[in-house]
Image (cartoon, rainbow, N blue to C red):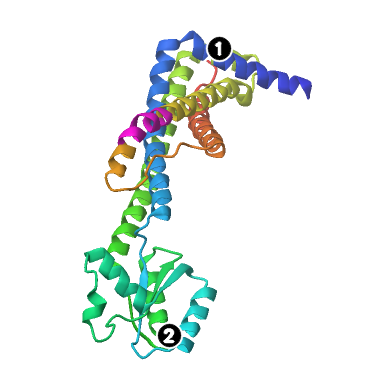
Amino acid sequence: MKHFFYLHWQSASNAFTRILRQPFGSLLNLVMLSVALALPLSLYLCVNSLQDWVGRLSATPQITLFMEMSAEDADLAAVNSTLRKHPRIKGYRFVSRQQALKDMENRNGLSGLADGLESNPLPDAFIVTPATIEPHELEMLQKELSGLPMVETAQFDASWAKRLYGMVDLARKLTVFLATILGIALILITHNTIRMQILARRDEIEVAKLIGATDSFIRRPFLYHAFWQGVLAALIAWGLTCWLVAMANPAITEFAMLYNERVNLISLNAPEVLAVIGLAAFLAMFGARLATGHHLRQLEPR
């Protein structure tokens, strides 16, 4: 068992040393791999930051329930009880007729407006904040709430909600698509790199086969070479995303302040960094496994 781990440790250290001995060629490959990783990572950060901003957005789609003018305290209590227990409602607040009229006076500078009216024309209202921004669920919730007792109208900005949800959903799909395409590119780049190494060491491999070396023994250093390439490329890609966050956040923050909003890019956390490193190493080793499996079958000793 000790010999088994020693062989793997030796292959891993030799593969890492080989990368250091060829700094220029290794750097070019690492740059290509890190760019392939950094692009979907950057889009992922943007989507995550957008979702975080949407979660804090003061203009989150709200459903306003306008009560009938004849609604009594018992009707208001019934609606209040239903909203408090509803699982798809994040929060709500009650705006009385008197408060609504007072707010309108303050907002429009119409002090004394109530004195010129025979009666208050505004209804009581409940302003409901849903727990989701998905348009279909919002429409279902609107229909459900409009059927509550003495609710005259339940309205919300459906088009705004659909645009917001569509933007987040499109960005999420683009992230998955880009990650898939560039993940395949990472496999192909690694496959080509290992293929060139195998061809360059053809004679060495044939001699090793002549003296009885197994395919797994010959394959091992190439797999570890791909492993280190994947790990180093992931670390460089992480550094690029950190640089993006550091460079972009001041400008984004300054722009958002013009609209009294607080928006910034969120860096990768520790589990996400480990996941990226693991995925990059796996894809690189997968590409190396394909290359070695294909070429070792063709390289028979002469």
Image disc number at residue 203? none
Which residue is depicted at the point 39% across and 50% down? Answer: 53
Is residue 118 toward the left or the right of residue 150 in the image? left
The disc labelled 1 sits on which kind of residue? Thr
Q: Is residue 247 magenta?
A: yes
Question: Circles 1 and 2: CB distance less than 8 Å?
Answer: no
Magenta part of the chain: 241-251
The residue closer to the viewer here, 37 or 113, is: 113
- Quadrant of image for the N terminus: top right
Residue 198 percent across, percent down from the top left: 48, 19
Query: Dot 1: what SS?
Result: helix
**Foreground residue, 165 or 71?**
71
Residue 100 to residue 297: above or below: below
The residue singled out by tag 2 in the image is 148
Instruction: Say if 263 sits above or below 276 in the image.
Output: below
For this orientation, the residue located farthest to the bottom is: 70
Which element type, helix, strand or loop, lies under badge 2?
A: loop
Say which of marks 1 and 2 sits in front: 2
Q: Quadrant of residue 5 in the image? A: top right
Task: Determine the residue positioned at 45% across, 83% down.
Answer: 76
Q: Amino acid at mark 2?
A: Leu
220 above or below 144? above
- Residue 121 among those drawn in magenta: no
Label 1 Cα crowd, 10 Å radius (few <14 / some 14-19 / many 20+): few
Residue 29 in sight in this render: yes
- Report the number of discs: 2
Structural distance between the alpha carbons of marks 1 and 2 = 72 Å
Residue 111 percent across, percent down from the top left: 24, 69
Left/right placement of residue 2 relative to residue 203 reads right
* Residue at x-position 43% and y-position 64%: 132
Residue labelled with disc 1 = 17
Q: x, y percentage for residue 17?
A: 55, 12
